[in-house]
Image (tube, rainbow, N blue to C red):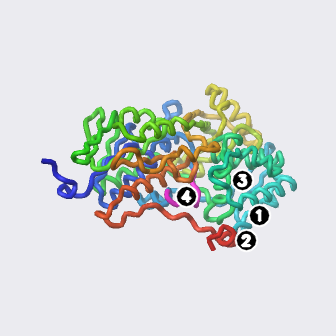
Amino acid sequence: MHATPEQLGPPIVTVIGGGVAGMSASCALAEAGYRVQLVERRGYLGGRASSYLHPGVNEIIDNCQHVLFGCCTNLIGFYRRIGVEKKIHWTKEMTMIEPGGQRSKLGPSPLPAPLHGLPKLISAHAFTRADKLALARAFRAMMSPIPADSTESLSAWLIRNNQTPGAIERFWRLVIASALNADLDTIAVPYAAKVIRELFMNSAQAGAMGMSSVPLSELYGSAKSFLEEHGATVHLNTNVESADWDEEVSQWTVNTRAGTLVSDFLIIALPFEAMQKLLPHMPPAQHGEELARKVDRFEHWPICSVHLWFDREITDLPHAVLLDREIHWMYNKTVLQPWRKFKGSYLELVQSASRKFAALERQQAIDQALSELAEFFPAIKEANLEKAALVKEVRATFGVPPGIDSVRPPSASPWPNCLLAGDWVATGWPSTMESAARSGHLAADALCTSKIEDCRFLEPDLKPKGLMRWLSGTG
């Protein structure tokens, strides 16, 4: 005779996938009293947000620079839960640099939202008067609701709203398309509008940018400690091969190469491509084929990063946006991560949404990055490059083309006692760490029962401030 979950104690939850989605769900449920089993095929937690010792340069590097913003309430809530919120370097200013070195700064002023960014936009040398007027028109247009099922691409919307070439190239393509990691003609307008409202209009707090001051694997290693302190077990280097549902006893059996795990609930927190591989090994379900068809609609977009170590200081800027070139973002790891104590400069250059750059050979990519970087920072010409590394994250994000929301599944799955999580499920956010953390909290909320109190994990959105409280209809 099988014992019931009530006889055995708090329900057992198996979470498949140790990325941000799986960690956020696991930590929330463990804190609430559930017995959690987190399974991860790699030897560390973090998924695509991780770091490792690069053998070619003998340095710990992140697989790609990850950023968050003040509006990322669920990611920040997750950081607060595991005690790493103070390991984030925050800034409210964005420095844009033109080839030749001329700089412009975007950031907040004392004016109320959504006007707080207007003074610095007006004074920005990077945009002509026509560009600024075009951007102002676009921001105003995006105040109006945009249907979630809009089939218009951002590229078409920009043309229809009379955006200038300068506004398109130096703002929409560089800042917005880069943030969404896709080409303008493959971005759904509602997602672009969400980025505009959250980062530039709702409040100065919402648009503040944060970067980890420690390697990502160290940041997320705290989740493992948190889980173990709350009675959870973390199974690393454990590959899930299949899962079976026993209707008679209402239990899941997860089959791994190391053995089996039995639980009352299952959360599948995998990237969409890993979900594709697992689906044929799940029990038959009425809507299983429908989920498989939805997953097949997702597409990857790459992000590349070039890591450069110089023998001297190149710049004291912590980060910058680089205009009119293939390299988009510069992150000064010497400033952002002072624990490294590197005597010269360690810079990470990030290139988003370009399959062309991702196709370059290692030395080609490094040479191009060096050549372009010298156009922004003259000190490069006098410096010696001590070592370099190229990292290609070919599965960095999923695309957000028009119509993508119709195939993003909810937390509910086709199977009983099983929830879905991952940045690709229906969170209302693009492919970000916030979407992943939000999906984990949504799955935990859906799983939670009245047997355990205090089971509401989804963090509320930041409320618009200033005039935006009335303009957004929340005042």
| Discs 2, 1 touching: Cβ within 8 Å | yes
Q: Secondary structure at mark 4?
A: loop
Q: Nearer the viewer, residue 378 or 175?
A: 175
- Corner quadrant of residue 137: bottom right
Foreground residue among 177 and 210: 177
Asked if the residue at tag 3 contacts the one at tag 2, i.e. Cβ–Cβ closer than 8 Å, the answer is no
Mark 1 or mark 3, which is nearer to you? 1
**Residue 334, x across and y down, in percent:** 59, 48
Instruction: Identify the secondary structure beneath mark 2.
Output: loop
The residue tagged 2 is: 111
The answer for how far apart the CA atoms under marks 2 and 3 are is 20 Å
Q: Are marks 1 and 3 in contact (CB under 8 Å)?
A: no
> What type is the residue that disc 2 sits on?
Leu
**Marks 4 and 3, how far apart in space?**
21 Å
Look at the image and give the residue range highlighted in magenta. Answer: 67-74
Residue 183 lies left or right of residue 28; in this view the side is: right
For the residue carrying disc 2, how many other residues have a C-alpha within 10 Å: few (<14), some (14-19), or many (20+)? some
Disc 4: which residue: 72
Residue 166: percent from left, percent from top: 82, 47
Label 3 secondary element: strand
Q: Which residue is mark 3?
A: 95
Closest to the camera, between mark 2 and mark 3, is 2
Instruction: First in sequence, mark 2 or 1: give its number.
Output: 2
Residue 436 forms part of the magenta stretch: no
Secondary element under disc 1, as helix, strand or loop, is helix
Q: Amino acid at mark 3?
A: Thr
